[in-house]
Image (cartoon, rainbow, N blue to C red):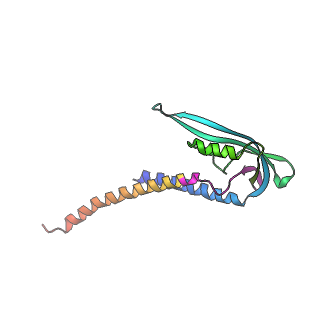
Amino acid sequence: MIITLIIGLVTGLFGIIIKVLDNSAKKWNRAIGTITRSELIEKISEDTDGRKSITYKVDLEYSYSKNGEGKEMVGNQLFPYVEAWSPFKQEKIKIQEKLPQGTKVEVFYKPGNSSMSCLIAGANYFPYYFISAGLFFVAIAVVIWIYDLSDDLTLVLDQIIAK
């Protein structure tokens, strides 16, 4: 039960931290950039049982300059802090179609570290997977705890029954 609770708390906390960081990126500075590369990448993984799974990512690259002047920077993040791999190919194809090479985009870049950038801030769905998984594991731990308490309650009832 304790291990399940710890897994749930750590997983949920990770999701919350990523969500807070994602929302904080909405306050970053902004610049106009241009997509310089937009390709769909497919990654095939195989588990120990030989089952294959395929995930997809739009490999983006965009250029922008801080305050629209000066040194040109290059970024490749769609969302801040996370890679956007997904098993949903159609979703990634839509993103790639929406962001072809040469498209002008708004780029969020971190103040004080203009090399850290992204195209979408505050709208990442990825943390919700971790928050949901964390809640699931915490719920399992609570159910196990309640079940364990029900055994203790039987002992208490045995003490009050007249013999």
Would residue 101 be found to the left or right of residue 138 on screen? right
Of 43 and 12, nearer the camera is 43
Q: Is residue 111 visible?
A: no
Residue at figure coordinates x 68%, y 48% from the top left: 78
Task: Answer with the quarter of the image where residue 30 lies.
Answer: bottom right
Coordinates of residue 149 in the picture (x, y in percent): 31, 60
Of 141 and 44, nearer the camera is 44
Would residue 92 be found to the left or right of residue 137 on screen? right
Coordinates of residue 137 in the picture (x, y in percent): 44, 53
Residue at figure coordinates x 71%, y 44% from the top left: 76
Coordinates of residue 3 in the picture (x, y in percent): 43, 51
Residue at figure coordinates x 43%, y 51% from the top left: 4
Which residue is most to the top?
50
Residue at figure coordinates x 36%, y 55% from the top left: 144
Of 112 and 127, nearer the camera is 127
Q: Is residue 115 visible?
A: yes
Coordinates of residue 146 in the picture (x, y in percent): 34, 60
Which residue is most to the right?
70
User: In this picture, which residue range is highlighted in magenta?
Assistant: 109-128
Would residue 66 be found to the left or right of residue 2 on screen? right
